[in-house]
Image: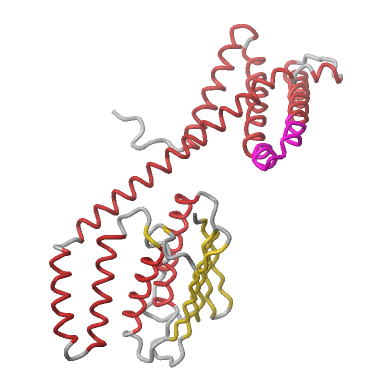
Amino acid sequence: MKIWRQAPSIVQLQVLIWVAVLLLIFFSLLPMVGLPTSVINTVVNTISYAIIIYGNILFLYPVFYQKGRFVSYGISVAFFLILTGMLKGYAGIILYKHFLLKSEQVDLLSLLAYVPGLILIYVLSLVFRIAIAYFTLKQQTEEIILQKSQAELNLLKSQVQPHFLFNVLNNIYYRVYKVDPSSAGLIERLSDIMRYFVDESPKDEVPVATEVAFIENYMALEKIRIRHGATINFEKAYNPELRIPPMLLMTFVENIFKHGIDKSRKQNLVTISLIQQDGFLYFKTSNRKFISAETDSSGGFGIANLSKRLSMLYDQNFELNIDQEGDLYAAFLKIPVK
């Protein structure tokens, strides 16, 4: 029988570790000092260890060490260990006095005597941080592999002889072109979109020019469904060979046509910009927000899913902002590029 139906999370692993530490301290002290003293020492030691470990990995290390402030980090660690050691000693003395009726003298030297024992805990906090980072990275990697496998499976399910469909579309294109070139152009765009889904979307990265061509084809097909059309200003400034993950920008464009176009309005203005600058790619969209009875809340799920995907791809090194003021909807995405 399996104890875990799925791999334990980082939080679950940490809970298990602390439970094991607590039990280890308690049962190692119990034969020597008895039950009451064992309970007090176990509680005081476990709490002080947790303060040292999480204080270092969650605050001191990222605030000082990761930003190159090594001297400040060393001073902060020393002060932190001294303060925690003194608090640990004082808490133990107070608990002994209250529960065991044992009175001990409280002075600076007796409190400082608790500090050296915490130095090893500080060293262990660095190991603890490495372990958490490893398991987090491993979990993210497994999630990415799972999502990629699921996407490939879904793609295989949807591929009903794609090359046959492409050949049919090409034949239709040449027939329609003789009588209606504009309609033939739309058929060509549809063929390009289908080819993108089959050939490009399974890849880890695609040229940004390919991604933009896909977006422009999608917008051209969407515009024919709008009675009075739409004015789309698309500003572009980037290296065409720059590579980005596929379908990364599509969520914003889909939301424009789902929630930002009023088919009965004669003026639908959409502004889009894709700019490469200083090692980053900036993608911005702006449009009027129009909510009809036909629209749903799927756009919110699209943005939420996009945010999760960005976190897996770039960790915290990206910006995603949605700004809604009145009937104006603006989206902003900033990702690092090489």
Q: Position of residue 201 (x, y in %)?
A: 31, 59
Q: Position of residue 119 (x, y in %)?
A: 69, 21
Applied colour scheme: secondary structure
* Residue 162 shown left or right of residue 186 in the figure: left
Q: Position of residue 44 (x, y in %)?
A: 68, 24
Residue 72 part of the magenta segment: yes
Q: Nearer the viewer, residue 152 or 19?
A: 152
Q: Position of residue 31 (x, y in %)?
A: 59, 7
Please report the residue visible at 50 percent of the width from the left and 56 percent of the height from the top.
337
Q: Is residue 21 above or below residue 158?
A: above
Q: Nearer the viewer, residue 161 or 142?
A: 161
Please report the residue visible at 52 percent of the width from the left and 56 percent of the height from the top.
336
Q: Residue furthest top?
A: 32
Quarter of the image containing the N terminus? top left
Q: Nearer the viewer, residue 23 or 251?
A: 251
Q: How many marks?
A: 0
The answer to which quarter of the image holds residue 107 is top right
Prevailing secondary structure of the magenta residues:
helix
* Residue 23 shown left or right of residue 259 in the figure: right
**Can the viewer see residue 271?**
yes
Please report the residue visible at 66 percent of the width from the left and 26 percent of the height from the top.
122
Please report the residue visible at 39 percent of the width from the left and 80 percent of the height from the top.
293
Q: Is residue 225 above or below residue 163?
A: below
- Span shown in magenta: 59-77
* Residue 265 shown left or right of residue 286 in the figure: left
Q: Is residue 181 above or below residue 164?
A: below
Q: Is residue 140 above or below residue 162?
A: above
